[in-house]
Image (cartoon, grey):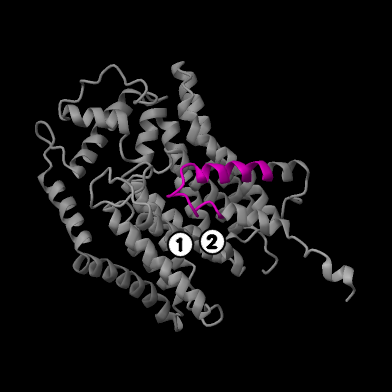
Amino acid sequence: MSIEQRMRWPKVDGAALLCALLCAGPLFVLTLRGWSNVILLVGMLVCAVLLLSTRAGPAPGGGVRVHRQAQAVVLALFLPLVAVAWSDLWRQDLYPAPFDSPSRMWAAIPIFLVVLRLRLNPARMLQFMLPAALALTLAHQWLAPQPRLWGPERMSTHFADPLVFGYLSLAFGLMCLMSISLRGDQRERPWMLAVKIAGVGLGLYLSVRSGSRSGWIAIPIVVGIWLHLNARPAGERGRVLVPLVAIGMGCALAGAAYGLVPRVNVRIHEAVSDLASYSFQGVAPDSPVGLRVTFLRIAADLIAMHPVAGVGDTAHMPPAAVNAFPYASPLAVATAFKSAFHNQVITNTVRYGLPGGIAAALLLFVPLVVYARQLRCACPVARANARMGLAFAICIAVSSFTTEVVDLKYTASLYALLTALLCGASLANHGQE
């Protein structure tokens, strides 16, 4: 080898660098304010340049089914901003703030298209990024403790409340779990398996320490799916028994957590007690779960009064009939209008009418369906990304029933980024079919 050849810089793989940049989104999402916004913006600009310069390559093949799923993903990312614009134009109230979070979904569309065309494999990098993100979050809690704005027992950061802190930590942990393969032909190396198991443990630990129940129902669901994917059914009987055993073990895990983890036990008992004490006669009690039930009742009345275009951002311009809820305390009404209705689809329906609710439902559930269908793909790279994506989508969808998951700028950016990455990689033709 000549001196010139030895001194030459190694060839830089631009696609791998782009993938590493995009996969860094979860790394400091809970510790550095605006981190996911910056990663999404930079990634969008780079991907837009690649598309405009045709360096992202031609649209890949994959058959009619893949093209339809890709179109559905683009539509799901496209519609939230359209619903906001429709509502504002109908009500003649062009208020800019509601466009912030939906615009993140539009920014993810170029990323989705580039991941699809360049056939990137984000799961390969996320298997390192996610445990690192959880470890950095825990280190941040130890080394730079912040004032406990929601009480000394609830872990959070200076900008991420316990709900967001809890369900994102849990989502990252479950994604680590789904990236583990126990199949003989895909078994992990011991050191990599240890890293992923540590990620699972850290995600569960941080979620429990947050004191937030949002997303906990996703645990037995994802564990059951993971067990089903890693079991090898023997014969026709095994194909029936394996799913049942997986469901049973997922429920057993949930029961063990209830019996062995005091914080889980206390939080579940509080929820059951709140539901049992809730009354539909007179003014409803203002317990944590009771408030959520009252929020849904207020939302139902508002949707019935404004089904076409909603009422807009209630924190910005509440509807005139603020005293039309005799079953709700002044605290419940004020909290619902200021902090939304603790359900993503319901909140969007109140704000932007039925089109807003449909757009929110598509945004949450279209990616979930794409991941579930791609689990049967013949390509192992596509399956690996679909498995990670399915864990993320299930956790976020479950959490969306009790809190807003894409209202805040940084949570919307993270959701848009990971959806674009994992949907694109799940649908891409990686050349291994």
Q: Residue at x 41, y 62 (%)?
A: 173
**Residue 239 falls within the magenta-colored stretch:** no
- Eye-nearest disc, 2 or 1: 2
User: Which image quarter: residue 265?
Assistant: bottom left
User: Which image quarter: residue 48?
Assistant: top right
Residue contact at pointers 2 and 1, CB within 8 angstroms: yes
Specify the amino acid type for callout 2: Leu
* 56 or 155, nearer to the observer: 155
Q: Residues within 10 Å of mark 2 (few under 14, many from 20)?
A: many
Across and down, in percent, residue 403 comes to 33, 43
Q: Which mark is residue 175?
A: 1
| Residue carrying label 2 | 126
Q: Say left or right for 82 vs 357.
A: right
Between marks 2 and 1, how big is the CA–CA gap?
9 Å
The stretch of residues the image draws in magenta is 24-47
* 152 or 117, nearer to the observer: 152
Q: Residue at x 46, y 65 (%)?
A: 176
* 351 or 244, nearer to the observer: 351
Q: Residue at x 27, y 32 (%)?
A: 336
Q: Say left or right for 81 vs 265.
A: right
Whether residue 217 appears in this view of the structure is no
Specify the amino acid type for callout 1: Met
Q: Say left or right for 229 vs 284.
A: right
From this view, report whether residue 278 is shown above or below residue 389.
above
Describe the element under mark 2 as helix, strand or loop: helix
Quarter of the N terminus within the rendering: bottom right
Whether residue 172 appears in this view of the structure is yes
Quarter of the C terminus within the rendering: bottom right
